[in-house]
Image (spheres, grey):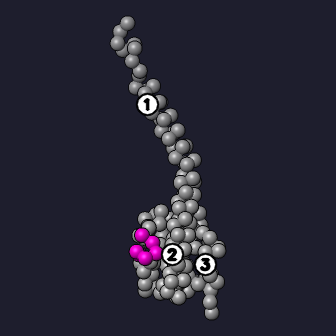
């Protein structure tokens, strides 16, 4: 038998590479939704921890951190360090918040307020509604 008869042709190799590429694309598309959902869950968990630290600050100091102080005032007394959100940006702190006495917010994948899907904001009132006190007048 000649060696050329035992080898794969270029067309056969190209067909296999195209099939593998299509399968990789389908798997990537199918798992993207799960990855975005996991990022939002991580943001909710981080925000719940930060909101708990803000509540502990309130109990200790009798006031919420001011906007100028932000979340940095919580380190190291109430949290070890400030995490970045799953998209690599800092969590935002607003006092007073629109729906609560304060808000800890991640602005999602786009980094801008508002949005839907992966770009939707995640805030402490979404993460754990019982973690913040009602807004005081």
Residue segment shown in magenta: 75-80
Q: CA distance from mark 1 to mark 2?
A: 57 Å
**Image check: 34 left or right of 83?**
right
Which residue is tagged 1?
A: 14
Whether residue 116 is in magenta: the answer is no
Q: CA distance from mark 3 to mark 2?
A: 11 Å
| Residue 22 position within the rendered picture, expressed as x and y whole percent measured from the top left | 51, 39
Asked if labels 2 and 3 touch by Cβ distance under 8 angstroms, the answer is: no
Which residue is tagged 3?
A: 132
Label 3 crowd (10 A; few <14 / some 14-19 / many >=20): some
Task: Identify whether 39 is placed above or below 6.
Answer: below
| Residue 58 position within the rendered picture, expressed as x and y whole percent measured from the top left | 53, 83
Which residue is tagged 2?
A: 53
Q: Which mark is residue 136?
A: none
Name the residue rendered at 47%, 30% in the picture. Answer: 16
Location of residue 37 by image quarter: bottom right
Name the residue rendered at 37%, 6% in the picture. Answer: 1
Circle nearer the viewer, 3 or 2: 2
């Amino acid at each position: 038998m000649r060696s050329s008869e035992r080898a794969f042709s270029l067309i056969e190799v190209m067909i296999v590479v195209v099939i593998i590429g299509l399968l990789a694309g389908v798997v990537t598309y199918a798992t993207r939704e799960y990855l975005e959902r996991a990022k939002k869950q991580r943001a909710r968990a981080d925000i719940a921890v930060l909101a708990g630290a803000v509540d502990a600050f309130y109990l200790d100091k009798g006031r919420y951190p001011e906007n100028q102080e932000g979340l940095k005032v919580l380190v190291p007394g109430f949290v070890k360090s400030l995490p970045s959100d799953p998209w690599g940006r800092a969590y935002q702190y607003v006092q007073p918040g629109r729906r609560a006495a304060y808000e800890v917010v991640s602005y999602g994948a786009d980094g801008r307020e508002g949005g839907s899907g992966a770009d939707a904001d995640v805030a402490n009132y979404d993460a754990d509604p019982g973690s913040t006190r009602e807004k005081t007048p």
